[in-house]
Each structure stands twice: as structure tokens, then as C-alpha cells.
Image (cartoon, rainbow, N blue to C red):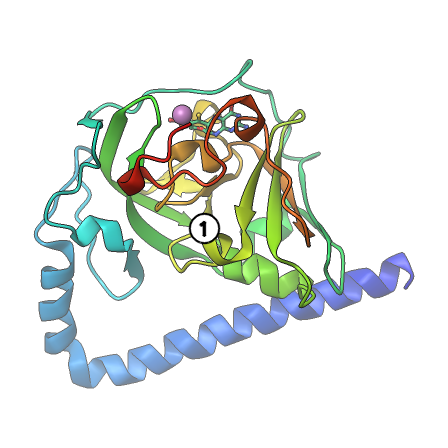
Amino acid sequence: MSGGDVNNKKDKLIEQLSRREFLREAGSIIGGVALTSALLLSACRESGGITNTNGITPTGSDVFFSPDTKREDRIPPGQYQTDGWPVLHYGDVPQISTSEWTFTISGLVEQEVVLNQAEFMALPMMKVFSDIHCVTTWSRLNNLWEGPSSKTLAELANIKPEAAYVIVKAHGSFTTNLTLADFLERDVLFAVKHDNQPLTAQHGAPVRLVVPRLYFWKSAKWVTGLVFTQEDRPGFWETRGYHNRGDPWLEQRH
Ligand SMILES: Nc1nc2c(c(=O)[nH]1)N[C@H]1C(S)=C(S)[C@@H](COP(=O)(O)O)O[C@H]1N2
Ligand SMILES: [Mo]
């Protein structure tokens, strides 16, 4: 395929995805008019009346609540709750020029996809409400994230049936590995916003992964792309003693 063909295909895919998102939204508006009161009631029930430390009260049908936010006790064993948001990573905060930034999807895919910043920002976005659990024992509850879902990006590249893992690549040589099943969970997204504000450089701008159900080291900051693979490839922290999966409820730390 020539470069032009690839770009046409990409534009068409983005268009299709946006249209699908539009139809879904249009459908929910029409259905929603009749159901407004029921939806409002369920939205209140959904948020559980939570207002977080940034004054955000997540409600509405456009927010997906990570299942762990509905637990009775939301702090996993060996964790403590903090209201602040610590900054944690290996190395320095990179200076990323958004005009040069790209997001590449490769490996076991039907089409390799390279998105620039404008194309990435034009993808359909979702909101996820989730908790953070860092392996160093702090937990930060009630985070509202916004960005394209993992599924949107997987569909864009059309992953091959042999793909079983995804290797997430970030600025420098940082990587982290996930099974396809963990990657495609409904609460996994590539965040561009946190609590309705653009993500800051220290927390991973322009784009960071968020995998709410695993320890936060899987949530790579400064993401530059994905590689779909048949075999597992343990990443930066996983090859330095961290657990290969990292379920906080099972204390899969090391
Ligand atoms: N690129 C990159 N992403 C990374 C890391 C890193 O070293 N490099 N560290 C991880 C770890 S261990 C944690 S706890 C979280 C911290 O994210 P925060 O600084 O936004 O709290 O980022 C994760 N993502
Ligand atoms: Mo961490």
C-alpha cells in the first residue's frame, strides 16, 4: 500500500468510528428523552453521591464506572489512601513536542496506524471513573479520566486473531506488557484529561494509558504506541522485579 492509501484508509476508519459513536449518542439522546428521570435516578445511584477532592461529581450515562469503585471497601490489602497525587516514574519528565508526537500501532495488525496529535484528539472519547493503586502502597480514589478507549485503538488497527498480548511503548525505551484480555477491559483508556483538566506533563501528557484494575505501573505515561504480539514481553518494571500482571486485590506486587 502506498502512503496515500494508508492515510485514506486511516481517515475512513476514523470517520467510521466517529460516526458509530455519533449514532450511539444520537440513539441515547432519543431514548434518553423518554427516560430522563430514570437516567437521572440511576446517575445519582451510580455516583453514590461522590464528590472528589477536585470537586468532581461523576454522573451521567457517559461515564463508565470501573467496577472496583463499587466495592464496599475500596482500599486493597497493604495500601493506604492519599488525597494528593504523587508523581512517580523512572528518569526525568520528558519534554514532548506535540507537533512531533505520534502514536503508532504495529505488530499483529491488519493495518499499521500512525496518528498525529490532531488525529488522536479527533478519536471518539470516553470517560472512566476509577481508583489508583501504586505498588509503593498509596491509593488515590475517585479519578475521572477522559480519552479514547483501548477498544477504539484496537479497532482502528484491526488486530489479527493470533494477537494475545499488547506491549505498550512510551517515551524513551519504557514499555509495559498486558494480556489482550486485560487491555480490552471496558475501563481501559488512553487519557488526555484528568478531572476535566488536560493531563499535565508530569502525569504523562500528551497521552497516558490507564488500566484501573491493575497496579499503576501498568498505566504508562507519555505513550507513543502499541505493539500487538503473540508472545509476552515483560516490560521495564516487570523485568526489574515487579509482578508480570499486578492485581492489587491479590497483592501481586513482586
Ligand atoms: N513512561 C513511564 N510511565 C510510567 C512509569 C515510568 O517509570 N515511566 N512509572 C509507573 C509507575 S511505577 C507509577 S506508580 C505511575 C505513576 O503515575 P503518576 O506519576 O501520574 O502518579 O506511572 C507509571 N507509568
Ligand atoms: Mo508505581
Residue at 60% from the left image edge and 49% from the top image edge:
166
In this rendering, does residue 205 appear at all?
yes
Left/right of residue 55 with respect to residue 193 in the rendered view: left
In this rendering, does residue 195 appear at all?
no
Nearer to me, 106 or 145: 106
- List x then y, in percent, for residue 164: 61, 57
Against 3, is 234 above or below? above
Nearer to me, 168 or 178: 178
Nearer to me, 33 or 203: 203
Residue at 10% from the left image edge and 61% from the top image edge:
44
Q: Is mark 1 within 8 Å of ligand 1?
A: no
Against 1, is 173 above or below? above
Q: In the figure, residue 194 lies in which quadrant? A: top left
Ligand 2 resides in the quarter of the picture at top left
Left/right of residue 76 with respect to residue 8 in the rendered view: left
Please tell me how many numbered marks the rendered image carries.
Answer: 1
Tell me the kind of residue under disc 1: Leu
Left/right of residue 158 with respect to residue 241 in the rendered view: right
- List x then y, in percent, for residue 112: 76, 56
Q: In the figure, residue 235 lies in which quadrant? A: top right
Residue at 35% from the left image edge and 54% from the top image edge:
127
